[in-house]
Every structure is written in structure tokens, then in C-alpha cells.
């Protein structure tokens, strides 16, 4: 009887070994997973929750703990990102290019350079009068009464330059450049005002 009992004990032990090994392996794996949760210093990723606002990490500084033991940790200071709108740049116009000979723009180009203004001033003049009249000698604003390429208000003002003010682009341009020079110094000054206020 004893040998049978011994054989039974061996079989019982063998059966216990078969199910205890997987449990031991499971507990070992669980230990590796739970250690960072139990000990916060074991995992940097779980140390701090993410703040709602962005933070700026400052250089490491010394902080005295409650027990009087000095420790170091990064100091954090909350900050807000403020978008500063870009200020609009007035008085700058795209390049107008070389005008076709014999056109109103060609006449204006020669007059601008004859006044000693830079070519950039011609660019501003083109942009300004594109907006005002589209360089149309007969452009007439019914609501205000402005007339011609420079939109003189009233159109009769241009008679100070020539009697043909209603039909001659050179007369209108001469008057328009005189008006701009006297009031805004340069075409780019007039263009800047037009951009800001919608008129010049």
C-alpha cells in the first residue's frame, strides 16, 4: 500500500506543478506592470498629469522639502500664447511694369520720373488710379461728381491746368500729380491714405 501512496503523492505534486507555473508567470508579469503605479518614481511618464494650459519648463532649481532636505526638480511657470496681429503695411504697391507707349500710364510714368520720384512711386500711382478710375479719362462718379483719371472733385478743378481737362489724359494726369504732391507729398502717400480711408 505504501508504494501506491507514494506514487499518488508524486502524481499529486506533478499536477500542482502543471497549474502553478502559469500562475507564477502571470504574477511575475503583473509585478512588472504594477511597480510603476505603486512607486511613482519608477515611471516619469506617470509623474504629472498634463496641464490644460501650456507650460514653460525653467532650468532646474533647488527646492527645500518639508523635512529640510534639499531636492531638485524643474520649476514650471504657466504662460499664455498671445497672437499679436501683424500691422498692415500701407503705401506699398505691386510692381506696375513698363507701360505701353502712347497710353495714359506711359504719360504718367514720364511725369513721375520727371518730378524726381522713384519708380516705386509710379507703382503706387498705378494702384491708386486703378482703384479710382481704372485710368479712364471719362470716368464719372455719379454719386460724388468726381471725374477723370484722378477723380477730381469737381472735375472743373482740372481746368486750372488746361481747357481740355475733360478729354485729355495728359492734362488730367498733370493736375492729379500736382494735387498729390501738394497734399500727400508722393503717390505712395496718397495710396497709403486710400488704403486706410478708402479715398484720397
Image (cartoon, rainbow, N blue to C red):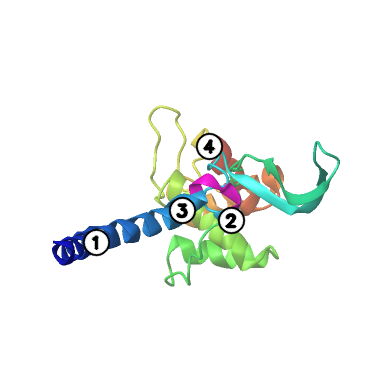
Element type at marker 4?
loop
Q: Earlier in the sequence, mark 3 or mark 1?
A: 1
Residue 164 in sight = no
The answer for how far apart the CA atoms under marks 3 and 2 are is 28 Å
Q: Going from the N terminus, do you reach mark 4 or mark 3 first?
A: 4
Q: Which residue is mark 3?
A: 168
Drawn side of residue 19 relative to residue 129, left or right: left
Name the spot of residue 79 as percent of width and height, x first.
65, 40
Q: CA distance from mark 1 to mark 2?
A: 94 Å
Give the class, few, some or many, for how many residues have Cα within 10 Å of label 2's Cα (few <14, many ≥20). some
How would you rate the neighbour count of disc 4 (Cα within 10 Å): few for under 14, some for 14-19, many for 20 or more? few
Q: Tell me where residue 107 appears, x and y as whole percent.
A: 51, 64
Numbered tag placed on residue 13 in the rendering: 1
Q: Which mark is residue 52?
A: 4
Q: Nearer the viewer, mark 4 or mark 1?
A: 1
Question: Which element carries disc 2, helix, strand or loop?
Answer: loop
Nearer the N terminus, badge 3 or badge 2? 2
Identify the residue position indicated by label 2 in the image.
92
- Residue 62: give x, y in percent of width and height: 82, 49
Q: Quadrant of residue 111?
A: bottom right
Magenta residues (range):
37-41
Q: Nearer the viewer, mark 2 or mark 4?
A: 4
**Observer-nearest of 110 and 170:** 110
- Neighbor class of circle 1 (other Cα within 10 Å; few <14, some 14-19, many 20+) is few
Of residues 113 and 75, the one nearer the viewer is 75
Q: CA distance from mark 4 to mark 1?
A: 57 Å
Alpha carbon separation for disc pair 2 and 4: 42 Å
Q: Is residue 112 magenta?
A: no
Q: Which quarter of the rendered picture does the N terminus lie within?
A: bottom left
The secondary element bearing badge 3 is classed as loop
Amino acid at each position: 500500500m505504501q508504494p501506491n501512496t507514494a506514487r499518488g503523492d508524486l502524481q499529486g505534486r506533478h499536477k500542482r506543478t502543471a497549474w502553478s507555473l502559469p500562475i507564477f508567470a502571470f504574477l511575475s508579469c503583473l509585478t512588472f506592470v504594477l511597480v510603476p503605479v505603486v512607486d511613482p518614481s519608477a515611471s516619469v511618464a506617470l509623474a504629472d498629469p498634463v496641464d490644460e494650459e501650456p507650460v514653460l519648463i525653467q532650468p532646474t532649481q533647488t527646492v527645500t522639502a518639508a523635512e529640510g532636505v534639499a531636492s531638485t526638480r524643474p520649476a514650471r511657470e504657466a504662460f499664455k500664447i498671445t497672437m499679436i496681429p501683424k500691422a498692415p503695411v500701407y503705401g506699398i504697391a505691386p510692381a506696375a511694369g513698363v507701360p505701353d507707349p502712347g497710353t495714359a500710364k506711359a504719360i504718367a510714368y514720364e511725369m513721375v520720373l520727371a518730378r524726381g520720384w522713384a519708380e516705386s512711386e509710379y507703382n503706387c500711382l498705378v494702384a491708386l488710379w486703378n482703384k479710382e478710375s481704372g485710368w479712364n479719362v471719362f470716368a464719372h462718379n455719379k454719386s460724388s461728381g468726381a471725374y477723370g483719371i484722378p477723380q477730381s472733385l469737381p472735375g472743373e478743378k482740372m481746368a486750372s491746368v488746361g481747357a481740355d481737362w475733360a478729354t485729355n489724359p495728359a492734362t488730367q494726369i498733370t493736375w492729379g500729380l500736382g494735387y498729390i504732391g501738394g497734399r500727400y507729398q508722393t503717390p505712395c502717400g496718397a495710396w497709403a491714405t486710400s488704403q486706410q480711408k478708402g479715398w484720397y
